[in-house]
Image (cartoon, rainbow, N blue to C red):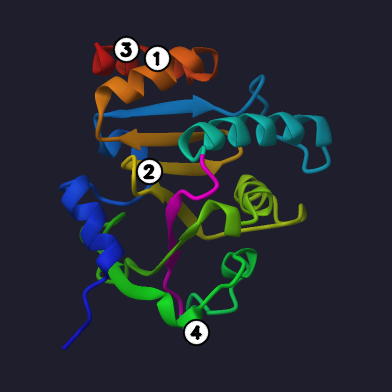
Amino acid sequence: MKKTNSHIKYINENFPELVIRKPLFYNWDISLRFDLQKEFKNPVAPTDDEYFEEVYLRAETLFEFCFESSDTEIIICVQQYQLEGNEIEDENYIFNQIKDFDKTLIERDQVKKIYEPDDEDDIWNRATYQTQLKKMNTKNLIRGICHTDFPDRKPYIEEEIYFINKSKNIIFHIYDDRGLDILMTNKSKLKILLEKHNDLILEYDRELILNRVN
């Protein structure tokens, strides 16, 4: 009998009908979208250290709000498009950033047609792992995700990563260097985050966000 992924079960119970895919912000009403860019740039030069330092700062600031205690239990959900021989390995860079990592605790499954409903080949490998904030090298993980479109910058992470705070029911997702999404189940907590970091809200979605929280 196939073992049920308990971490995904938790997500399904607390975020019913949520599809874990980008753009996460548009998949859940109690959510905010933040701008990681101080000013819009297109294209971004991979060597622009000043640009990336601001991206890191904003991402880390918002992460700290969502995961403030070092003892916070975090579920790391990793998704990768399936190609031949393209598995999420136990020795994946992401898992190497976790102290006392135990590969036997990884829970794996697959999801299909999350981006292309009519495509039988739209198959994604998924691996989830639960740990504590203090055991994660948060800096490397955040920066690696921010470099997802810039393989020449290190660290580099190409997989989708969703961080989940189990005690507060928060999902935190950096989609690339441009921005990130934060989902909650409690609208009052979302308002606190909005008030504290109102200046970082993505202007394009500000009207939608304000309609959601009011």
Q: Residue at x 63, y 45 (%)?
A: 146
**Labels 3 & 1 near each other (Cβ < 8 A):** yes
Magenta part of the protein: which range? 69-83
Whichever of callouts 4 and 2 sits on the residue coming sooner in the sequence is 4
Mark 4 to mark 2 CA distance (whole Å): 29 Å
Secondary structure under tag 1 reads helix
Whichever of callouts 2 and 3 sits on the residue coming sooner in the sequence is 2
Amino acid under disc 3: Leu
**Labels 4 & 3 near each other (Cβ < 8 A):** no
Residue pointed to by mark 3: 210
Secondary structure under tag 3 reads helix
Amino acid under disc 4: Gly
Q: Nearer the viewer, mark 1 or mark 4?
A: 1
Q: Nearer the viewer, mark 2 or mark 3?
A: 2
Q: Is residue 188 left or right of residue 172?
A: left
Q: Nearer the viewer, mark 4 or mark 2?
A: 2
Amino acid under disc 1: Arg
Q: Is residue 19 left or right of residue 79?
A: left
Mark 2 to mark 1 CA distance (whole Å): 19 Å
Q: Relative to residue 78, is residue 63 depicted above or below? A: above
- What secondary structure is the magenta-colored segment mainly? strand
Mark sitting on residue 171: 2
Mark sitting on residue 206: 1
- Picture coordinates of residue 113, whole percent (x, y): 25, 62
Mark 3 to mark 1 CA distance (whole Å): 6 Å
Asked whether residue 140 appears in the rendered view, the answer is yes
- Picture coordinates of residue 142, whole percent (x, y): 62, 47
| Residue toward you, 21 or 194 | 194
Whichever of callouts 2 and 1 sits on the residue coming sooner in the sequence is 2
Instruction: Locate residue 195: give its quadrant.
Output: top left
Q: Residues within 10 Å of mark 2 (few under 14, many from 20)?
A: many
Residue pointed to by mark 4: 85
